[in-house]
Amino acid sequence: MLNEWSSNLWIVIEFIIVSVVIWYICDYFYVAYSVYNRPRGFDADHCYLVTIQELTDKSPDFIPDRSQDEMVQDRLTIIERLRQMPEVEVASYSANSYPYNNNNGSFQAMYDSIGGYGINRDAEPDFVRVFRYHGVNGESPEQLAEELRQGKCLMSETFFSSRKPELAVSRLDKSKIYTQNDSAFGEKIGTAVFPVRYSDYSTFNSFILFPTSSLLWCNELCIRVKDNMDKDIVEKIMKEGQNRFHVGNYIVTDVTSFDDIRERYQTEESEQLRNYSAGMAFLLFNIFLGLLGTFWFRTQQRVQEVALRKVTGATSGMVFSRLISEGLLMLAIATPFAVGLDILIAHYELNQYLDGYLVWNRLAICAIVTVCLMAVMVIAGILFPAMIARKVQPAEALKDE
């Protein structure tokens, strides 16, 4: 191998370049897989969004001069009738709060001099039961709902930790939490809640949930259906939409499963991931063909060398293991240089973000996967031409010498 250092050096350089490319691909998929499989902080299975519309004065059923108290009572009547359905487990009104939703407000608070930022959610107490929020100390959705009924708000554990990871809300002195206008706020905060992610592809999870001050502000009605009772629930509600669920000037016009809401909301991210996956699979296939061609040509050029070794007593197994070991040895030489380039890419933040760019355990996992993939490609690239080369008859290969 030292005698053939010139050709081997180019193969090592090729290994370094290919290894960095494969590491980048592995890092991308590692981040995508990790983000998708992280806890979401909510459970939207068996949940539905019930759309309520208000009639206009052009409708023959419109009731003019409806007072705010009457409008609130109308909304309460609709939700109470939904709760009376045997299939419905719990229902709640909320404002810009349900998951997979672009409509959100924001809220800022201070802990000493540390600023915190999160999504502002307003909802009835039963909202946490619909989507099954849990407290960081094991509090159930029912316990969290009770705190909202007491007028407390629920803050995510990560509200301040985006600046300093050690600032978990459950460990803070709440008397030091203030709003932006320097008014004390900590006494209004209840249990710290597990982070609730924005969507399956997002890592943003900071929020504060307030008990709603008025149902007239609430533009959402969400329900949770009991397990195994989803069948025909949409049809049953819509069938009564013009009658039982038409109260005052309000009428139920649509019922949408959160499975459908989730799919529609994440269409762009899902298609992007699918396109990236197809493109990177095609790239890996081309890399494999490149390595296969390199070692096929290299092995074919060494047919006479293989024949000479067989004449001097080498077995087919010895020839095969020698060719394989040479390829793996060059890979081993290239790997430290490739890992060094991987570290530079992560240091300069040219890869995917997930709890940072240069995360050592993630870099190590992706590097190990890269080496394994490269080894498989090298072995496969050498395997077929080596099997042909070791079957060559020495007299045939050396007849022109």
Image (cartoon, rainbow, N blue to C red):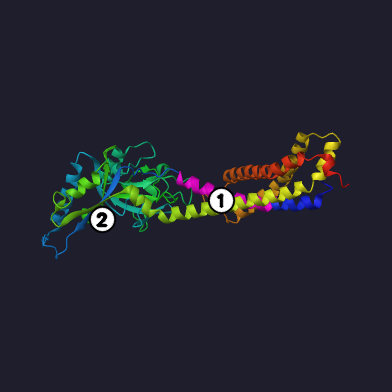
Q: Which element is circle 2 on?
A: loop
Mark 2 and mark 1: span between their CA atoms? 44 Å
Regarding residue 186, the answer to whether it shows in the image is no
Asked whether, in this view, residue 399 is left or right of residue 296, the answer is: right
Q: Residue at x 49, y 46 (%)?
A: 33
Let me know if residue 317 is in the magenta part.
no
Q: Is residue 287 above or below residue 170?
A: below
Name the main secondary structure of what is drawn in magenta.
Answer: helix
User: Which sits in the foreground, 123 or 30?
Assistant: 30
Q: Position of residue 189 (x, y in %)?
A: 33, 46
Q: Nearer the viewer, mark 2 or mark 1?
A: 1
Q: Position of residue 311 (x, y in %)?
A: 85, 37
Residue span colored magenta? 15-37
Asked whether, in this view, residue 196 is left or right of residue 255, the answer is: right
Q: Which residue is mark 1?
A: 281
Q: Earlier in the sequence, mark 2 or mark 1?
A: 2
Task: Decide: few, some or many residues near mark 1? Use Cα within 10 Å; few <14, some 14-19, many ≥20.
Answer: few
Q: Residue at x 14, y 48 (%)?
A: 244
Amino acid type, callout 1: Ala
Q: Which residue is mark 2?
A: 219
User: Which sits in the foreground, 260 or 207?
Assistant: 260
Q: Which mark is residue 120?
A: none
